[in-house]
């Protein structure tokens, strides 16, 4: 099958791209580095000619609801329009566990993305996953100011990006299934502990300090609203196992 990956060079997308090729499928990477900008939509229709399905794993770095809704609203609309024009038969979307319930900050954009996919003309499947193990590194990189790193109070149940990618590939090569079961990690963690452990493992010298993010998003992060429901399917690799791989230079997820 010929499958396009929107955001195919990112945290999950690179795994999706590699897995599709290894399993004999033809991946088409839609990313700025390959000449495609989902915010303008230019060239998407021609890029999707002959494509059987699209896996959308694009992301953006923002805590702003306005910025997030602009990004996901625009990229999703452009992608779905191009898919319909090209006759794509299956759109696979990656969202976040409880994003539509929280609907604030970054999650406001994901909630809008979910709505547009469900109302779109292209048959769809949607997987909601928890944050990835790599979230610790992303937080450290984005929140550090010199030797100080400010980390919002957050309860999370991180999952391996590679395991999310495996699930997305399985979904994409099948028929559209609508909303599929959520996927979470094997155990709950505190984000501040994850960031501190990642800094130690990678020998980054910084003082990690927690703070309470204001607003609905901050409340959701603190009170566990972003944790998966009891009984949700769980990935196998824990954050500690992933971090062991990072320390050894061979992260598996």
Image: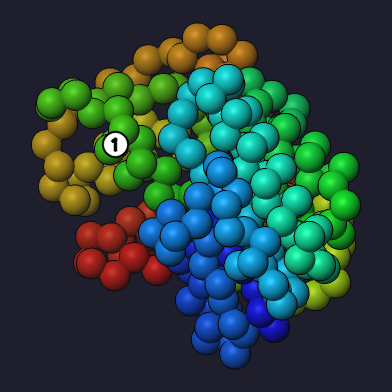
15 left or right of 194 in image: right
Q: Position of residue 141 (x, y in %)?
A: 27, 38
Residue 152 sits in quarter: top left
**Disc 1: CA contacts within 10 A as few (<14), some (14-19) or many (>=20):** many
- Which of the two residues, 196 or 40, is positioned nearer the viewer here? 40
Point 87% across, 42% down: residue: 119
- In this orientation, which residue lies closer to the viewer: 87 or 155? 87
The picture places residue 150, in percent across and down from the top left corner, at: 30, 22
Task: Locate residue 76 relative to residue 240 in the image: left or right.
Answer: right
**Residue situated in front as seen by the camera: 13 or 32:** 32
What kind of colouring is applied to the model shown?
A: rainbow
Q: Can you say whether 4 is above or below 118 in the image? A: below
Q: Which residue is drawn at 61% across and 67% down?
A: 47
Quadrant that contains the C terminus? bottom left
Residue at which label 1 appears:
140
On the rendered structure, is 91 left or right of 157?
right
């Amino acid at each position: 099958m010929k499958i396009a990956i929107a955001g195919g060079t990112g945290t999950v997308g690179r795994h999706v791209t590699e897995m599709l090729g290894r399993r004999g499928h033809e991946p088409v990477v839609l990313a700025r580095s390959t000449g495609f900008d989902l915010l303008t939509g230019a060239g998407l229709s021609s890029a999707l000619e002959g494509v059987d399905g699209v896996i959308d794993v694009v992301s953006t770095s923002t805590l702003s609801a306005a910025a997030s809704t602009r990004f996901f609203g625009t990229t999703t609309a452009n992608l779905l329009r191009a898919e319909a024009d090209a006759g794509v038969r299956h759109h696979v979307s990656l969202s976040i566990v409880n994003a539509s319930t929280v609907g604030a900050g970054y999650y406001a954009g994901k909630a809008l993305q979910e709505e547009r996919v469900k109302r779109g003309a292209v048959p769809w499947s949607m997987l909601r996953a928890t944050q990835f193990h790599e979230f610790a590194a992303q937080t450290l990189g984005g929140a550090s100011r010199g030797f100080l790193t400010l980390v919002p109070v957050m309860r999370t149940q991180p999952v391996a990006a590679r395991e999310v990618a495996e699930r997305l590939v399985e979904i994409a090569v099948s028929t559209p299934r609508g909303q599929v079961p959520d996927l979470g990690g094997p155990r709950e963690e505190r984000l501040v502990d994850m960031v501190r452990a990642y800094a130690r493992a990678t020998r980054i010298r910084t003082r990690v300090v927690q703070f309470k993010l204001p607003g609905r998003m901050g409340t959701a992060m603190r009170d566990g609203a972003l944790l998966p429901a009891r009984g949700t399917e769980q990935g196998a690799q824990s954050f500690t196992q992933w971090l062991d791989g990072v320390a050894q230079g061979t992260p598996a997820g």
